[in-house]
Image (cartoon, rainbow, N blue to C red):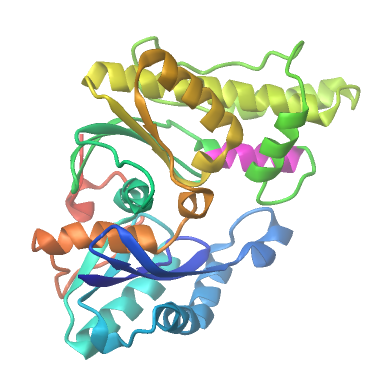
Amino acid sequence: MRILGIESSCDETAASVVEDGIRILSSEVASQVAIHHRYGGVVPELASRRHVEAICPVVEAALMGCGMKVRDLDAVAVTQGPGLVGALLVGFGFGRALAFGAGLPCVGVNHLLGHVHSVFLEADRKPPVYPFVALVVSGGHTALYHVPDPLTLRLLGQTRDDAAGEAYDKVAKLMGLGYPGGAVVDGMAAEGRSAGISFPRAFLDKEGLDFSFSGLKSAVARYLTEDGGKTPRVDIAAAFQEAVVEVLVTKAFLAVKRMGCRDLIIVGGVAANRGLKQRAGEEARRQDVRLHVPSPSLCGDNAAMIAAAGYHYLKAGKMLALEGDVFSRATDPERQGVLHR
């Protein structure tokens, strides 16, 4: 079964053809980093306009990349949410129209569930075994889920304020490193030493699985002001990253233990962070947990993960209703359909 996936939830326009939910035949991503860099973050209106310009060429490139025509497809999968409404509507509307015109079934995919399915696209790695725990960590989301089957996410805990990736971008901006800042801070952290700098760890409560990163961001801002440039920036980056990673890893493995699972997946843009992967890998070996992290190209927003998840929607008969619409937030269980507390 060959499915065309379309993703436009934020600032990447992406299209991919995936076979049977596990084999990538082609994948194209048009990034908007150069457009939003000058503003220090994603500007929704600019993102929407760029999606309109890029959607046709990106879909055509994905089809050409695997030597296929629309008539060779079995279905179309589109991101339905969560995300920026204006951006979502571009890919969602295009995908529905393409499917309708070609007489193909169309499914609307939860973006977060798409990230979860990115780990199943690694052909040379053993996939996680259901049920497992998923840490979804990116610029817009930081949450822990129990995943009992391919179409169910049960929320265990989430950020109460900033997402981890958002905190990285804000700290990068405070340090004058530009946008996006996650990869830059990660690279600097690898060269620095956190000794002597202690930023707060917001564990909130000992048994809870929620996160908070706004206080950490504020602590870094105060430190930069009071330090007056005496401490090397690489050391500040290392201390900041250590604080973020410690909380993420501690909560994730607490969730694994509580749910009685053997597998933990870490997905989303921040999953590409080297410090996070190293610390999680060490803890996984210590606790005898099977850790799964996708390749960097599959950590960020992409359409292959949407097509992979769409395969399971299609198998379950969850077709997109004619009156279906996008949704912006991950906290509306009725409209997103697959996310449960």
**How many numbered marks are there?**
0
**Residue 313 showing in the rendered view:** yes
Q: Where is residue 107 drawn, in percent x and y?
A: 21, 67
Question: Residue at image x 56%, y 26%?
Answer: 244
Specify the quadrant that holds the C terminus.
top left
Q: Where is residue 43 drawn, in percent x and y?
A: 59, 62
Residue 178 as seen in the image, left or right of residue 266? right
Q: Where is residue 176 drawn, in percent x and y?
A: 80, 43
Q: Is residue 44 above or below residue 193?
A: below
Question: Outermost residue toward the left?
Answer: 317
Q: Is residue 296 above or below residue 62?
A: above
Question: Residue at image x 24%, y 88%?
Answer: 71
Relative depth, front residue between 187 and 224: 187
Relative depth, front residue between 183 and 47: 183
Q: Is residue 313 above or below residue 279?
A: below
Q: Where is residue 319 drawn, in percent x and y?
A: 13, 67
Q: Is residue 153 above or below residue 88?
A: above
Start-end of magenta stretch:
165-174
Relative depth, front residue between 321 and 128: 128
**Residue 80 showing in the rendered view:** no
Specify the quadrant that holds the N terminus.
bottom left
Question: Residue at image x 89%, y 25%?
Answer: 228
Residue 243 as seen in the image, left or right of residue 127? right
Asked if residue 274 is among those painted magenta in the image, a careful observer would answer no
Majority secondary structure in the magenta region: helix
